[in-house]
Amino acid sequence: MNRPGLLAFDWPAPPGVRAAFTTRTGGVSVAPWDSLNLGAHVNDAPDAVLANRARVREMLALPAEPAWLAQVHGTIVSDLDADLPALEADAAVTSRRGRVCTIMVADCLPVLFASRDGERVAAAHAGWRGLAAGVLEATVRAIGVPGAQLSAWLGPAISRAHFEVGDEVRETFVSDDAGASSAFVRNERGRWQADLVALARRRLAGLGLADVSGGEWCTFADRERFFSHRRDAQKMGHSGRMAALIWRA
């Protein structure tokens, strides 16, 4: 989808599955949330957030209001087919048309999933804490389809060049998977540059997913298109949020 406010990307999703990722442009919020901020928890004006969310729903001709989750960097997966789906969660799954799985990000990695038959879709919020805790594994379990029968798309996230972490973060991953060390490079300050995309790909491969697309955009480096919490909040106190969405048409 090559339109203002939306990222153009090529993911061969199954027939009947629609996916989108919003950019920071095309909304009504003022700086530092300029302009298509979708996060209601970042001190932006509530009316502006509601107007931006309405614009996204109109742009995408969504069948319903997206499921806006309260994300906490955990592993809970909200089942949108349930009578009372969890509101505090870091992933969502559905098999029904008219339910829109939605994840908000501003450096963390959004991961979209679809079963090859198009019957099940999901979205996961994978920052380093969620990745380490197993949010991708929890999402695949909730989908209920073997990894070999799933397709995944990795959206924009902070790249290794801009994501500095300490020893404790590296140890969290390497203690369980020695091969994860390849996703970390020591920098001149004696700390580590961490590759979220590489870490996610390792986790997905371990789940049997071979059909994985995306992961080539850096939120920190691309100021024109993307919000970045690490870049923006440190300088301006706040950062907006973008959204990854997936639904069955």
Image: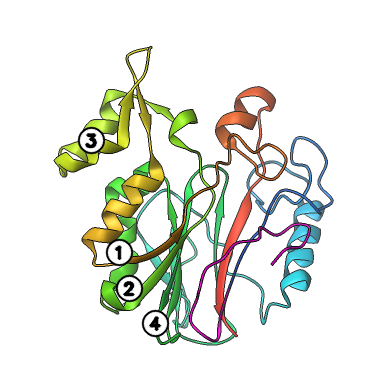
Disc number placed over residue 181 in the picture, else none: 3
Ranked by sequence position, the earlier of labels 3 and 4 is 4
Separation (CA) of disc 3 from disc 4: 32 Å
Q: Give the secondary structure at mark 4.
A: loop
Q: Is residue 98 magenta?
A: no
Q: Secondary structure at mark 3?
A: helix
Distance between the Cα atoms at labels 2 and 3? 28 Å
Tell which tag, 1 or 3, sits nearer the viewer.
3
Of residues 16 and 40, the one drawn nearer to the viewer in this rendering: 16
Q: In the image, which is nearer the foreground, mark 4 or mark 2?
A: 4
Q: CA distance from mark 1 to mark 2?
A: 6 Å
The residue that appears at 35% across and 43% down in the rendered structure is 129
- Asked if the residue at tag 2 contacts the one at tag 1, i.e. Cβ–Cβ closer than 8 Å, the answer is yes
Q: Residues within 10 Å of mark 2 (few under 14, many from 20)?
A: some
Nearer the viewer's eye, disc 2 or disc 3? 3
Q: Secondary structure at mark 1?
A: helix
Q: Name the mark on residue 116.
A: 4
Q: Which kind of residue does numbered mark 1 sit on? A: Ala
**Which amino acid does the dot numbered 2 rest on?**
Ala
| Image spot of residue 109 (x, y percent) | 47, 50
Categorize mark 1 by other alpha carbons within 10 Å: few (<14), some (14-19), many (20+). some
Residue 108, percent from left and from top: 48, 45
